[in-house]
Amino acid sequence: MLLAAGIFALGYAAYVVADAKAYQASELRRFEEARQTRALPRAPVPAEDGSIGELEIARLGLATMVVQGDSPAVLRRAVGHLADTALPGEAGNVVLAGHRDTFFRPLKGIRAGDLIVLKTRGGDFEYRVESTSVVAPADVQVLQPTGGRTLTLVTCYPFSYLGSAPDRFIVHARQTGGRTRSRF
């Protein structure tokens, strides 16, 4: 029974990883096609599980798709944009959440001054990391609107913790300028 349970657990883990990789590749392909058409100057607010863009932190080797929502199904396959927070390019606080053991694992090496690029159909938005912090899960101040154009990344902490982590790791970044020209 233990052997069967172990095989099942490994099989499920392999399925989750393969599903996330396939989803990321599919969404990236669809996103790049949509950016090339440039049919809309700004994409409408996507529905739950709809693609918003691609998050990239080159120094950390992090590149992942961002989709609307923060449900377990969304966060298993991508980084999620929290509803009721600003969209990229809007004034306010753009809040993105991701799992520490998948897409946001590289955040353990982030530092002040790092460049974050959020690519959308409407253009690329660059943010510069100002600070990081560790907060309790109930501390929702980090989700509140801000003055200016900011980006907040949220993941569980500590990074090496097994199971449900007791804290949240927060990255605070500020947009460095307006919309940049699309690189595609």
Image (cartoon, rainbow, N blue to C red):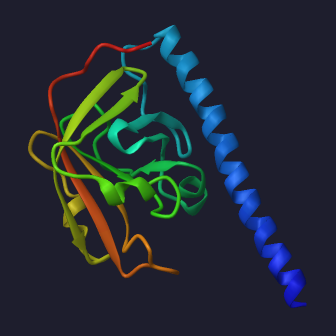
Which residue is at a point 71% across and 50% down the rendered structure image? 19
Q: Residue furthest bottom?
A: 1
x then y, percent, for residue 170: 26, 61
Q: Residue at x 72, y 50 (%)?
A: 18
Q: Residue furthest left?
A: 147
Placement of the C terminus among the 4 image quadrants = top left
Q: Nearer the viewer, residue 106 or 91?
A: 106
Viewed as shown, does residue 138 lie left or right of 67? Answer: left
137 lies left or right of 24 = left
165 on left or right of 87: right
Q: Position of residue 2 (x, y in %)?
A: 85, 89
Depth check: 174 or 139 in front? Answer: 174
Q: Is residue 147 above or below residue 170?
A: above
Q: Quadrant of the N terminus?
A: bottom right
Residue at (32, 56) in percent of width and height: 109
Q: Is residue 65 above or below residue 71?
A: above
Asked whether, in this view, residue 3 is left or right of residue 34, the answer is right
Location of residue 27 (image quadrant): top right
Count the labels in the image. Answer: 0
Q: Residue at x 61, y 25 (%)?
A: 30
Horizontal and vertical percent for residue 119?
A: 39, 28
Q: Is residue 115 above or below residue 20?
A: above
Residue 113 in the image: state x and y as whole percent: 16, 43
